[in-house]
Amino acid sequence: MSEAVLAMVDVQAGYGGGLVLQGLDLQIDKGTITCIVGPNGAGKSTVFRVISGLIKPKSGTVTFLGKDITGQSPSAVLRAGVAQVPQNRALFPEMTVHENVLLGGYAIRRDRALLKQRMAMVEEMVPLVRERAKEHAGNLSGGQRRMVEIGRALMLNPSLVLMDEPSLGLDPKSVAKVALLIREMAASGRTVLMVEQNVRLGMNLATHGVVMEQGKVRLTGDAAGIADNPEVATMYLGKARED
Amino acid sequence: MEIVQILAFGILMGGVYALLSSGVTLIFGVLDVVNVAQGSFLVFSALLTWQIWDLTGIEPLLLIPVMGALMAFFGWIIYRGLVKRVVPQGPGMTVLLMFGVAIAMEGILNIAFGNKFKSVTPPYFTQSLQIGELVLPYPQLISGVMAAIVLVGLFFYLKLSWAGRALRASAQNKDGAALVGISSIKASSLAFAIGAMTAGVGGVLLIIMYPIYPATQYDWIAKLLGIIVLGGMGSIPGAVIASMILGISEAFAQAYIPQWSAAIFFGVILVVLLFRPEGLLGEKTREDVTT
C-alpha cells in the first residue's frame, strides 16, 4: 500500500456562513502528481486554503505525514513542509531573483549552513535562479517568474507542494519548462498537488486525478483513467477528445 | 561661493528631511497607513530632549540613541495598542486615528511643556566650521551628518538584515510575504517602531537647530507629507531624492526670497506632481507586477 502524505477526512469548510467543501475526503500519496479539476465553484481553491491554514475547517481533519494539522496557522503548516505556489504573482518585484528565493528560506533564516545548502539545491533544480540572480523579479517574463516562485517554494525542502494553476497565463514554451520542473520535483520524492483549469495539460502532467463537484470529490483515479473517463471527457475536454 | 554655501545648507537640511520622511514612507509602504502623527512624535522627542538637557545639562547629541530607542518603543505601543485594531477599517480610518493621536499628543505636550518655544543651546550652538569661504554652522552641520549616518544605517539594515528583508517584502507584496512565513503583524510593528525611531532621532537634531513648541508639529507634518508624495508614496529612495530637491530649493528661496520660502517648498511639489502624479519614484500601478 502506498504511503499517504496528505489525508483530508470529511472536511467541511467555507466562508462566512456558507459551506464550500461539504464533506471532502481526499488522500494524496507520496511522490505523486495529483491534479484537481472541477467546474468553477467546486471548491478547488478552498481545498488549498484549508490545507495551508488560511481557512479553519468547520469539521473534519487534515493529516500531513501522519500529524494532524487541522486549523494550524499558515506559518506552522509551512514549517511542517507544505509550500504553496499561488495563482497570483507572489514575487517581490523590486527585489532581485536571489533575494526572492532567499526569502523562501525565511523560516530557516537562523541556520546559515542549511540556507546555503538549500540555495545550492534550488539553483541546481532551477538554473534560472543562478543565471538571473541579480535581476529584479519585476523585470522577468511570466514563465520566468513562475520558475522563481517554484524555486522559492523549494527553499524549505517541502514534502508537499501546492500549485494553483501552474500554467495560467504562460506561453507553451514556458508551460513545458514548468511541467518539466514539476516532474523533477516528483522524481526527487516530493509530492505535488495542483489545481489546473487546463484539464488536458493537467492530466498529461499528473499521475493521479481528482474530479471535484459541489464541494465533494466526485471521482479519483490515475490520471490516464480520469482523462479517458467518458463523463469527464464530455464535461471538460469537449470535442477535442474526439480528435 | 555664495551658491556653494546655499547648496551646502540645502543638502544638510535635505539630510534631516530625508531621515524624517523615510520613517513616514516606510510605515506607508508596509502598512498603507499614513502616519500623520509623525510631526507630533518629532515634537515629543524634541521637547523631551529639551527637558533632559534643561535638567541635567547633558550633551544633547548623547541623547540620540536614547530618544531613538524610546520613540521606537513608543511607536511600537501605538501600533499594537491602536493602529493594529483600526487597520482593517481601511486607510481612511487610520488617517483619522493618527490625526487624533497627533492632536491628543499636542494637547498633552501643551500641558506638560507649556505653549512656549523651547531651545537646546549647547556650546557649539552659535559656532561654525569654516572651510575657506564656506561657513557651516555646527548645529546644521551636525544635524545633517547625524541624519545621514542614521539613514545609511537604516539603508543597510533594510538591505542586509532578515528583519529588513521581511519589511521590504511586506511593502512590496503582502500576500507573497505571508506565503514565505513573514508575520504581517510583526513586520508592521517593526515598521512603526522604525518610523517612530526616525522621529526620535530627528527630534534631537531639530531642537539643536530650531526653537520648538507643541504646535510646530503642523509645519513638520505638512513638509513630510509633501516630501513623501513628491518622492512616491512608500519609496524610501524617492523620499531621499525629494528631500534633497526640497532642502536645496528651500535654501535658495531663503537666501534670495525668504518670504516665499514656504511657497517655493510646496510649489516645487505642485509642479512636479503636475507632470508625474505618481511622484518621482512612485509606481503608476503596482497591479501589473503584483496581481
Image (cartoon, rainbow, N blue to C red):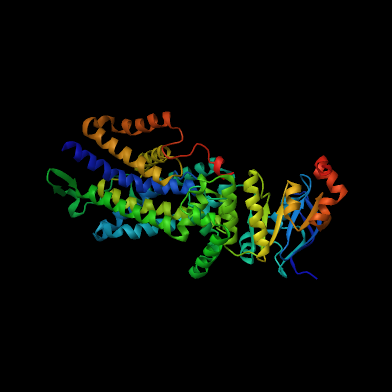
Which of A82/A188 is in front?
Answer: A188
The residue lying at 50 percent from left, 42 percent from top is B95
Q: Nearer the viewer, residue A237 or B259?
A: A237
Left or right, residue B182 beside residue A194 = left
In the rendered image, the vertical position of residue B170 relative to residue B289, given as above or below: below
Could you tell me if residue A53 is visible in this image? Answer: no
Question: Which residue appears at 59% of the width and 53% of the height?
Answer: A147
Query: Can you tell which quarter of the image residue A235 is in?
Result: top right
* Image quarter of residue B210: top left
Outermost left residue: B132
Along the viewing direction, whichever of B3 and B253 lies nearer the viewer = B3
Position of B145 compared to A201: left or right? left
The x and y percentages for residue A1 are: 80, 71
Residue B33 image offset from top left, x and y in percent: 50, 45
Q: Is residue A223 visible?
A: yes
Q: Position of residue A229 (x, y in %)?
A: 86, 51
Residue A217: x and y in percent read: 82, 55
Which of the image's four quarters has the C terminus of chain A? Answer: top right
Q: Residue furthest right?
A: A230
Q: Residue at x 12, y 43 (%)?
A: B133
